[in-house]
Image: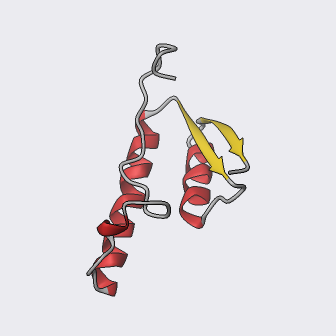
Amino acid sequence: MTLAGNIVISVGLFGHSGDNEVWENMDEGTLTKTKEMLDDMHKRKIDMADEIYVINAGGYIGSSTKSEIEYAKASGKVVRYLETME
């Protein structure tokens, strides 16, 4: 997408499929606050974007991503998907 001339605002970390060290040693309160902060940051990225591109690897879209998709749609953003079965 970058090579096609688009500015890409990407994910900051992959909490479900890597970057596990982010969550290590966090108590439940800190974990909850961190997830809320990340969810808010993703919505601020959506605010800046013209559209969002959901990478749906393996047919799973979690609750945070579903929330972000609904937020984007409610904000009038185009939502596109890449579906993979990996």
Q: How many marks?
A: 0
- Judge left or right: residue 82 versus residue 44: right
| Residue at the image position 26 percent from the left and 81 percent from the top | 25
Q: Is residue 22 above or below residue 86?
A: below
Give x and y (percent) for residue 15: 43, 62
Q: Is residue 9 above or below residue 56?
A: above
| Residue at the image position 42 percent from the left and 46 percent from the top | 11
- Which one is nearer the viewer's eye here, 25 or 67? 25
| Residue found farthest to the bottom | 28
Give x and y (percent) for residue 3: 47, 16
| Residue at the image position 46 percent from the left and 33 percent from the top | 49
Q: Quadrant of residue 78?
A: top right
- Which one is nearer the viewer's eye here, 30 or 51? 30
Q: Is residue 37 above or below residue 11?
A: below
| Residue found farthest to the front | 86
Which colour assignment does the render follow? Answer: secondary structure
Q: Is residue 47 above or below residue 6?
A: below
Give x and y (percent) for residue 47: 43, 40
- Which one is nearer the viewer's eye here, 16 or 45? 16
| Residue at the image position 36 percent from the left and 77 percent from the top | 32
